[in-house]
Image (cartoon, rainbow, N blue to C red):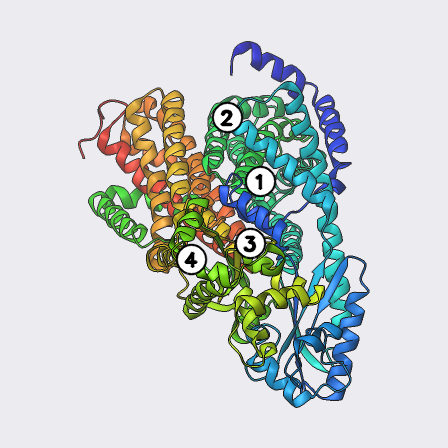
């Protein structure tokens, strides 16, 4: 700290602590007023790549064929599904759900058309659509039709006929989609070219409007889920029911985030109080750090609310992390203050606080900067929630540093020094043990770390990105149970769309040339557009096109990863009985399309074929609970078969859906992990060179942190824990936090070495002084992270346990490997006292 800056700091903070506290109080009060605006976001958009081109195509397909954001209610009655009592209860459940304001429709086995219960003709269907509730419907035949129907089997009813499903469709929110489309359009334009001033202003305005509207929509969606569950509760005495679907997963995930933020934020706080009380045994060393942590968290949460910056699943632990990092800064100040007080018991409070700040500000500044750099490396991940998490933590750490050197020392100025603390305690004994250990077994220590690194690298080679979304939740949660039941009995959960376009125009011309040598066909049966209808203008909706589509449908249905497959083929096969057992030809298809009631067209044809009949959609549900599911392999296999075996052109085949978007995000994790680690190591190396003013010292200092990062990734590989949007952040976090202790140790080592130029004596002194602060912070951080293991969200559990364990490894590396390398490599010059 420069002389001028030090004088200014002493005048403003230490000599006028009341003014400092007043300013902090005013700032805290301002931001506290925006805490109610704090938002949570667990939507599907927070789990996908922001600039993924597949996302744009997915949204265009959803706009054409309808959204897959619906709720599924599984209904397993305690008696026969087709009994009067059960159907009456099912009817009441459907009607109650239909009355909800935002519900557009509820589809159940009571509502869908039946054509074989008893069999009806096309003419009869045009007059009246028969359903299970139509008088004269034979329930025995209806049961058989449901179980054998190409459409209803494994969609509305299970194989054994014991479980049925209700699909709750919500009204499309046009305001939401118009804001989303405009925002994404401007964002894409910004990536490809430079926006004008007006366009930049519009993008900022539209983004704010979208964020605000989206937050309100998420709140409304949560209220809808609560209302749906209340209705289900009134019917649970007659049936076992589970709720599924993207909106429910979003609502429950938000509840998990909210629970983790409040419960674990408070839990970590209480735990830290206990740790501080046990470590320092004075109320001041509990109250002052906790006050600093609370104010830091309050200001940061208020800022996020003010900025309309929602917290996602990835950043849900930022409060706990921020509390832990803030506390680590204050612990170093406390330990240094107690050392100075023990050395100078008669010193005044002003002198003690001033000297504490003077000796620790440099190392704490560099630790804060390097930790910010570590989290800043997440900005290169390319995944929006991970990027946001990096920004949040970088800003939070900057705030923590400012408050640690303003609020904490200013508050300390109002207290008297009291009696000095004892220099010998359990912590000193532990750190002293490590100093003696590495001096006696220095070669063995190096061998142990080499073995750890080799095993870790071997584990990294086993690291993968494939993971099941269902495994994000404990088996006791409704999300897990509902997804597992739908997978087992109702044809899978994760949506996957295969879109097949008609071939380009030249292909159509070639087809005309192929039949040009058969003029008698046109002479005998000269077609007209009016007579041919859609079969004459559509590439797919004719006997030839449907035959090819049928082969594609059967292939997709034969895949072991796929459950229910729906397409226009499903509908035409179901309607074959209307042709009195005769083969379906173009004439019948044309009549069928014209005479089918609009309701049936909208439910059976429109979701799977474009209006002109030149594009087909195959709606697939994939078994999410299948442990052998390999999304990337499945997508490639489908593409390869349709192009190589079916003969379709590559530009005709498109694979879309949430499975594709989620897979794209997972596949980007390897690249993101390598990129973020590369950025963080390069950035921290540069920070070390600036801080230590020595390339050799920087290289030595980076090694223990590399060991910590490598071992956590290797451990994940050996345990079979895949990279996901949360575990990808662990390595950067471990480096960012662990590097703090490295910087403090090296700074203290450099200072102590110049006293006698004895490396081993310097190690002893450093372990007895700064080593104790390192021990306190590492143990506090480790135990704080382990509290996250009580979460209901499995990635949070992995995050807490892996990060906590890695902090222990980092502490051991800093207390053993780091001093041993300093002694062996002698970056500060020769040791004039020792030859070992």
Which label sits in the foreground, 3 or 1?
Answer: 3
| Residue under the image location 62 percent in, 38 percent down | 289
Which label sits in the foreground, 3 or 2?
Answer: 3
Q: Do we see residue 795 in this rendering?
A: yes
Vertical comparison of 686 with 124: above or below: above
Residue at the far top in the pictured view: 4
Q: Do we see residue 791 in this rendering?
A: no
Return the residue at label 2. 365
Element at label 1: helix
Residue 381 in percent (x, y) is at 46, 38
Which label sits in the foreground, 2 or 1?
Answer: 1
* Mark sitting earlier along the chain (3/2): 2
Return the residue at label 1. 322
Element at label 4: helix
Q: What whole-number distance in Å separates the C-alpha atoms at marks 3 and 4?
A: 36 Å
Element at label 2: helix
Residue 811 versus residue 412: which sits nearer the camera? 811
The circle drawn on residue 537 is 3
Return the residue at label 4. 631
* Mark sitting earlier along the chain (3/1): 1
Residue contact at pointers 3 and 1, CB within 8 angstroms: no
């Amino acid at each position: 700290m420069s002389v001028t800056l030090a004088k200014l700091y002493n005048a403003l903070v230490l000599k006028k602590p009341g003014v400092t506290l007043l300013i902090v109080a005013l700032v805290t009060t301002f931001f506290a007023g925006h805490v109610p605006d704090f938002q949570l976001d667990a939507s599907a958009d927070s789990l996908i790549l922001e600039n993924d081109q597949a996302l744009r195509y997915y949204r265009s397909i959803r706009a054409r064929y309808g959204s897959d954001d619906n709720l599924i209610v599984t209904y397993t009655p305690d008696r026969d599904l087709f009994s009067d009592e059960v159907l009456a209860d099912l009817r009441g459940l459907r009607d109650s759900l239909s009355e909800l304001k935002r519900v557009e429709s509820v589809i159940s086995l009571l509502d869908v058309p039946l054509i074989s219960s008893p069999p009806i003709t096309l003419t009869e269907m045009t007059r009246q659509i028969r359903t299970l509730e139509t008088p004269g419907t034979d329930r025995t035949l209806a049961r058989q039709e449901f179980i054998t129907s190409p459409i209803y089997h494994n969609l509305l009813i299970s194989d054994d006929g014991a479980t049925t499903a209700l699909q709750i469709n919500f009204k499309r929110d046009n305001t939401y989609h118009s804001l989303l489309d405009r925002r994404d359009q401007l964002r894409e334009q910004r990536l490809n070219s430079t926006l004008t001033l007006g366009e930049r202003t519009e993008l900022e305005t539209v983004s704010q409007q979208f964020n605000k509207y989206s937050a309100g929509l998420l709140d409304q969606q949560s209220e809808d889920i609560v209302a749906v569950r209340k209705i289900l509760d009134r019917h649970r005495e007659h049936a076992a029911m589970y709720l599924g679907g993207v909106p429910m997963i979003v609502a429950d995930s938000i509840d998990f985030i909210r629970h983790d933020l409040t419960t674990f934020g408070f839990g970590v706080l209480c735990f830290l109080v206990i740790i501080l009380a046990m470590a320092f045994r004075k109320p001041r060393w509990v109250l002052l750090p906790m006050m600093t942590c609370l104010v830091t968290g309050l200001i940061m949460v208020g800022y996020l609310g003010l900025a309309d910056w929602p917290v996602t699943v990835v950043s849900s632990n930022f409060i706990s992390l921020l509390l832990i990092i803030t506390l680590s800064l204050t612990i170093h100040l406390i330990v240094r203050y107690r050392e100075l007080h023990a050395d100078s018991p008669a010193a005044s409070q002003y002198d003690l606080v001033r000297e504490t700040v003077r000796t620790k500000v440099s190392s704490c500044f560099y630790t804060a900067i390097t930790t910010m750099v570590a989290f800043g490396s997440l900005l290169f991940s390319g995944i929006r929630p991970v990027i946001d998490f990096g920004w949040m933590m970088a800003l939070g750490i900057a705030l923590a540093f400012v408050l640690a050197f303003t609020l904490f020392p200013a508050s300390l100025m109002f207290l008297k020094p009291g009696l000095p603390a004892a220099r010998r305690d359990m912590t000193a004994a532990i750190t002293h043990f490590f100093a003696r250990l590495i001096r006696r077994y220095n070669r063995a220590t190096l061998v142990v770390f080499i073995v750890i690194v080799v095993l870790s690298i071997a584990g990294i080679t086993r690291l993968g990105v494939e993971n099941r979304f269902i495994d994000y939740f404990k088996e006791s949660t409704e999300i897990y149970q509902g997804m597992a039941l739908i997978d087992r009995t109702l044809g899978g959960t994760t949506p996957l769309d295969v879109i097949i376009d008609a071939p380009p125009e030249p292909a159509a011309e070639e087809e005309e040339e192929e039949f040009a040598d058969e003029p008698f066909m046109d002479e005998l049966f000269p077609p007209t557009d009016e007579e041919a209808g859609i079969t004459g203008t559509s590439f797919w909706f004719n006997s030839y096109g449907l035959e090819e589509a049928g082969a594609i449908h059967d292939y997709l249905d034969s895949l072991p990863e796929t459950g229910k497959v729906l397409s226009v083929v499903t509908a035409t096969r179901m309607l074959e009985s209307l042709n009195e057992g005769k083969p379906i030809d173009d004439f019948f298809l044309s009549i069928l399309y014209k005479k089918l009631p609009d309701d049936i067209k909208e439910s059976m044809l429109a979701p799977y074929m474009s209006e002109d009949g030149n594009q087909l959609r195959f709606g697939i549900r994939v078994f999410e609970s299948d442990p052998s599911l390999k999304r990337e392999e499945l997508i490639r296999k489908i593409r390869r078969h349709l192009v190589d075996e079916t003969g379709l052109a590559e530009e005709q085949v498109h694979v879309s859906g949430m499975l594709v978007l989620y897979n794209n995000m997972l596949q980007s994790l390897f690249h993101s992990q390598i990129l973020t680690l590369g950025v963080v190591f390069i950035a921290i190396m540069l920070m070390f060179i600036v801080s230590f003013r020595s390339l050799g010292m920087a290289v030595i200092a980076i090694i223990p942190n590399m060991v910590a990062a490598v071992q956590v990734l290797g451990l994940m590989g050996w345990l079979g824990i895949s990279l996901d949007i949360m575990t990808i952040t662990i390595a950067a976090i471990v480096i960012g936090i662990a590097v703090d202790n490295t910087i403090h140790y090296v700074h203290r080592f450099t200072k102590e070495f110049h006293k006698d130029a004895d490396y081993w004596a310097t190690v002893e002194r450093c372990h007895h002084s700064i080593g104790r602060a390192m021990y306190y912070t590492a143990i506090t951080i480790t135990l704080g992270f382990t509290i996250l293991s009580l979460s209901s969200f499995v990635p949070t559990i992995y995050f807490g346990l892996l990060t906590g364990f890695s902090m222990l490894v980092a502490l051991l590396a800093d207390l053993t490997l780091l001093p041993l390398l300093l002694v062996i490599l002698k970056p500060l010059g020769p040791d004039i006292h020792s030859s070992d």
